[in-house]
Image: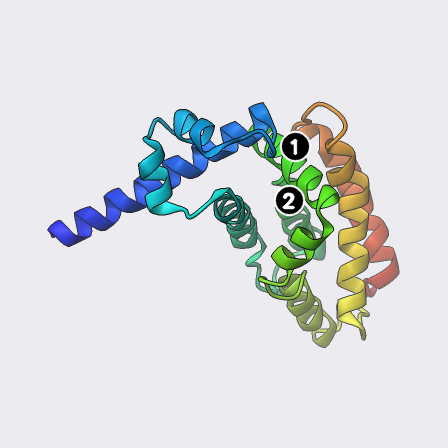
Amino acid sequence: MNELKKTANTTKKRESIMDGAIKAFVIEGYEKASMDRIAHHAGASKRTVYNHFANKDDLFQAVFKRLLSEQERLKNISYDPNKTLEEQLALFADAEIFLVNDPNRLALCKVLTTVFIQDSELARETKSKYGPPHANLVSWLKSAHEDGRMETPNPRLAAQIFHAMIEGALTWPALFQPCQTDEQLKPLKEDMIKTYLCRFGKNI
């Protein structure tokens, strides 16, 4: 029991340090956010921060991984023949919008985007640590194609097109304007899904 409690406390402390890092990155910018400032925002000692993370780069990777993991859980969507294509594709769209429909996540995404634009090598290194993009949607499209409801002989290309529509119309513009609610984003999201299904859906 004591070991379980110790593990839980360690996890909680690690999470609070990442929360402090996010505050530091957003408020002060990644370059100026020192480990001292991260410790301050986390309400922890600098030594405690270093006990959990070797350096700021490690913290950056941990923050990015946590955000990506939260998004990936939303993308864990299995094809359901009993649901409409529209409502299932809307779930994939919502997983992308998740990054920008909350002020805190939007602020973090702005920081991450800036860092990756300024350091292309870091962007490539970070990307290499994760699996192929859009894997869940590719799997879903394969199932919908096999079920005769979608015409996607090249599901990877079809997945790229879907994400290009969502990211181009909703995610990227959000980086340059105030945070919008789900209701504000809903009309454009729905029309894009209809447009996508006009191209890849089958009338059955």
Residue extending farthest to the left is 1
Residue plotted at (39% across, 36% down): 17
C-alpha gap between disc 2 and disc 1? 9 Å
Q: As shown in the figure, which amino acid type bears the numbered disc 1?
A: Asp
Residue at disc 1, secondary structure = helix
Per the image, the residue denoted by label 2 is: 94
Q: Are marks 2 and 1 in contact (CB under 8 Å)?
A: yes
Q: Determine the residue positioned at 32% across, 37% down.
A: 47
Residue 118 vs residue 178, the one in the foreground: 118
Decide if residue 60 is on the left or right side of residue 99.
left
Q: Amino acid at mark 2?
A: Asp
For residue 192, the mark is none
Q: Quadrant of the C terminus?
A: bottom right
Residue 47 vertical placement versus 57 (above, below): above
Dot placed on the residue nearer the N-terminal end, 2 or 1: 2
What's the coloring here?
Answer: rainbow
Q: Nearer the viewer, residue 124 or 31?
A: 31
